[in-house]
Amino acid sequence: MTQANRDGVALLVRHGLRVTRPRLEVLRAFDAHDTLTGEDVYRLLAGAASGISMATIYRVLAELAGARILDRHVLGRGPSVFALHRSGHSVHLACRRCGFVEACDDEHASAALAMVAASRGFVTAEARVVVQGVCIACAASPDEDVVS
Ligand SMILES: [Zn+2]
């Protein structure tokens, strides 16, 4: 068993989920990627060759999100984007044109979010912030209309 699989097993057990191959495979897809859609996961698992159907992947993503192993981000009209759950504050940058999503670990943003929560008396607070805009690559090709 690889280290990644051991980590996946430990994660599932800690969250009270049964260890299954589809769950481990889906988790493994997040080893090298901050954020993924269901289709991204399907493609990374080599599509039909993995023997794991698209429907199974969406069910597993929903289960992992339900167990708070993953966070689900709904960005406009695009597909849900999933990321490994982070405790504390998380900030994601999302491109409205191409759907690119990037996790942004910025200590200033985290400090600002913690301050806003504390100023309202929130003792333990988590923030999930999605900043929507246009990524560098899309900004460099201004011909296409921005999808809003
Ligand atoms: Zn873009």
Image: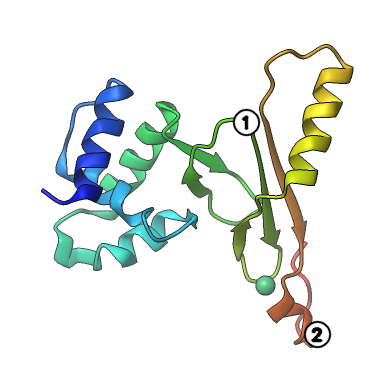
Q: Nearer the viewer, residue 80 or 45?
A: 45
Q: Amino acid at mark 1?
A: Gly
**Place of residue 123 in the rendered image (x, y in percent of width and height, measured from the top left):** 73, 13
**Place of residue 40 in the rendered image (x, y in percent of width and height, measured from the top left):** 40, 62
Mark 2 to mark 1 CA distance (whole Å): 36 Å
**Place of residue 47 in the rendered image (x, y in percent of width and height, measured from the top left):** 25, 66
Q: Amino acid at mark 2?
A: Pro
**Which residue is at 81% across, 23% downward?**
117
Question: Would you say 20 lies left or right of 97 here?
Answer: left
Mark 1 lies on residue? 88
Q: Determine which quarter of the picture holds residue 101.
A: bottom right
**Which residue is at 78% across, 79% downward?**
139
What label does residue 50 carry, if any?
A: none
Question: Would you say 135 lies left or right of 6 here?
Answer: right
Crowding around mark 1 (Cα neighbors within 10 Å: few <14, some 14 to 19, many 20+) is few
What label does residue 142 carry, if any?
A: 2
**Which residue is at 66% across, 54% downward?**
104
**Place of residue 67 in the rendered image (x, y in percent of width and height, measured from the top left):** 40, 26
Q: Determine which quarter of the picture holds residue 121.
A: top right
The outermost residue toward the right is 119
